[in-house]
Amino acid sequence: MLCARRLGSLAAGLAALRPGRAARGSLGAGIQARRVSTSWSPVGAAFNVKPQGRRLDLFSERRGLFGVPELSAPEGFYIAQEEALRKTELLVERACSTPPGPQTVLIFDELSDALCRVADLADFVKIAHPEPAFREAAEETCRSIGTMVEKLNTNVELYQSLQKLLSDKKLVDSLDVETRRVAELFMFDFEISGIHLDEEKRKRAVDLNVKILDLSSKFLMGTNFPNKIEKHLLPDHIHHNFVRDGDLVVVDGLHAEAPNDLVREAAYRIFLYPNASQLKYLEELLSNRDLLAKLVGYSTFSHRALQGTIAQKPETVMQFLEKLSDKLCERTIKDFEMMRQMKMKLNPQNSELMPWDPPYYSGVIRAERYNIEPSLYCPFFSLGACMEGLNILFNKLLGISLYAEQPAKGEVWCEDVRKLAVVHESEGLLGYIYCDFFQRADKPHQDCHFTIRGGRLKEDGDYQLPVVVLMLNLPHSSRNSPTLLTPGMMENLFHEMGHAMHSMLGRTRYQHVTGTRCPTDFAEVPSILMEYFSSDYRVVNQFARHYQTGQPLPKNMVSRLCESKKVCAAADMQLQVFYATLDQIYHGEHPLRKPTTDILKETQEKFYGLPYVPNTAWQLRFSHLVGYGAKYYSYLMSRAVASMVWKECFLQDPFNRAAGERYRREMLAHGGGKEPMLMVQAPLAPTSPSWFSGLLCKAQEVRTEPHPPKHKVI
């Protein structure tokens, strides 16, 4: 019921799909709406210079994270948590005593907002803050708020107050479309939480949900832990490729782009070596999800998770994946053969294609065939130039500008975090984006979008402005140059900014459905659509300039880059089909017929084609199993929808203001406040007579698609 459009991600920490006026003591006190700012600066320049630090000011007030006074210290999370729980009690009493009507939905949404804006903020801090004390305090807050949410989702009296409204046909007919949908979503959350069960089983459902939250957090943290091996077990000549800790070599990733085959192989075998604790967390997570699903009346967790999505049920997902796999098969085989030949050319002694090879050799083929060595492109893609490009695109398409604003003391968790105000030419300030773009120790490697505070219409008529964080892992600037992005990094930036714009423009009356609080297989559409803009010469030509000479990126270089994305695209997409299928099997019939690693081996050989490597367990690094559990297919289905939107609305003119306004009006503006199928069909209805066939057709047109994304929205 509460925070439900994002509660899966409360458990996830890094996961998916995935706050206003306040008295002292309530979260959000420091981030009230501001219509003007005297500290805005041009966005491109702001990102191409190092932060100069703030002038020494011994007397200014330390505002705390995101401007929240309580969060100037870790202990503030306890204060914010207790205030949210206190407010929750009052709102529950109010909801249960208010006569049924539109006011019932408003109270429910205020209740959801009180919990979500503490949980959302803590969800980000627990995985991104550099200080352990802040992370631990945020983790405890997530656990406390999550437990309260699950208790409320099985609160019979609260449920009955909503049921009185929805069972009265006259009252329901009097509700506007958005209010009715939000009321139905709250009811749906009650139902999938087991409100229909007896008291003992409802308590069991709460206990299972809390246990799942805890297991999710533990598993997620384990997906990023490095593995260590005694250095004498590795050849001396590859030691320098890894971090060393005394007599140990630390392997913290797959080193997929390393040119040395042995380095990639060593990283793959060591990083993916099975960890007993992590395996136990995964097995218990999958088992408890299945127990919960069966307890509340579903045959599998996947059936429960897919309610309300575009796909609706796992049978549709598997049909989509199997048919897509069949369509890709022939081209995937050709892609692997190209890579195999390239490996034979560069390494004749060992030409067998292995799972650690495709990222590197597909890159070599692209570079050789189209001369797209990243170092040739990076000087044209300074971070400031890319941000200015986004600013130009949003201004032409939607009338929106991005302005850099100086954060207050204590407002950000790292000094290199930038703050952007998002301003519409006639509507004014829409919200804030905090840009946590740069690498640092212990920072998760995943590129993510986090909702910190959702937008909603408040009782006094003001609009509670949305606040989000975009987290990337870009290199820092050097003494001689600003931060320079590879084409892939630039595409990732555009992808994540698509999520941010969804959050800014999904200006719903209710925060329960604001922005990216919508079905997962729709939430990725705006972000994937932005990848099309990032690959269009007309867009790139607006901003790609050499950081030293100002020379524009030649058109033939952009054309080569776009063409290169078609190389090995089938194999890239086949890998995503494998991941999505594995996710469906893990969340399908239980007990699982085999151990998770045996299922991985079998599924990899059937849906990918490269051999499983003994004594590896890739599934233990599959962080999407938390926030995207049973929904990893969303990337593929959203890609198909985004392809349709691009071709229908923007292919002819990527700066078409009328198309941009239509896209905002029909898709972005509703957040999750409208059925996803209706939002998609509105701009596509004239050209999409067969919905599923159209999806399949667009999904398998990999020769004209950008690469499958590996990002998250929270």
Image (spheres, rainbow, N blue to C red):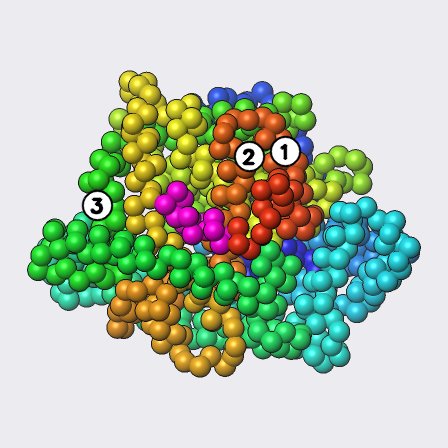
Tell me the kind of residue under disc 2: Cys
Does residue 74 appear in this view? no
Which residue occupies the foreground of this view, 65 or 121? 121
The quadrant in which residue 141 appears is bottom right
Q: What is the quadrant of residue 388 in the picture? A: top left
Number of numbered callouts drawn: 3
Is residue 300 in view from this perspective? yes
Q: Nearer the viewer, residue 565 or 271?
A: 565
Q: What residue type is labelled 3?
A: Val
Q: Distance between the residues labelled 3 and 2?
A: 34 Å
Residue nearest the viewer, comparing 415 with 601:
601
Q: Depth-wise, is mark 3 or mark 2 nearer the camera?
A: 2
Answer yes or no: do the residues labelled 2 and 1 have beta carbons within 8 Å?
yes
Which residue does the numbered mark 1 point to in the structure image?
Answer: 662
Residue at image point 39% right, 48% down: 702
List the residue tagged with mark 3. 364
Magenta segment, which residues? 695-711
Give the residue type at disc 1. Answer: Arg
- Compared to residue 300, the image places residue 419 above or below, namely above
Provide the residue designation for mark 2: 649
Disc 2 versus disc 1: nearer the observer: 2
Which residue occupies 17% across, 51% down? 342
- Does residue 345 appear to the left or right of 451 in the view shown? left
**Residue 593 x %, y %:** 44, 81
Residue 494 location, x and y as percent? 45, 37
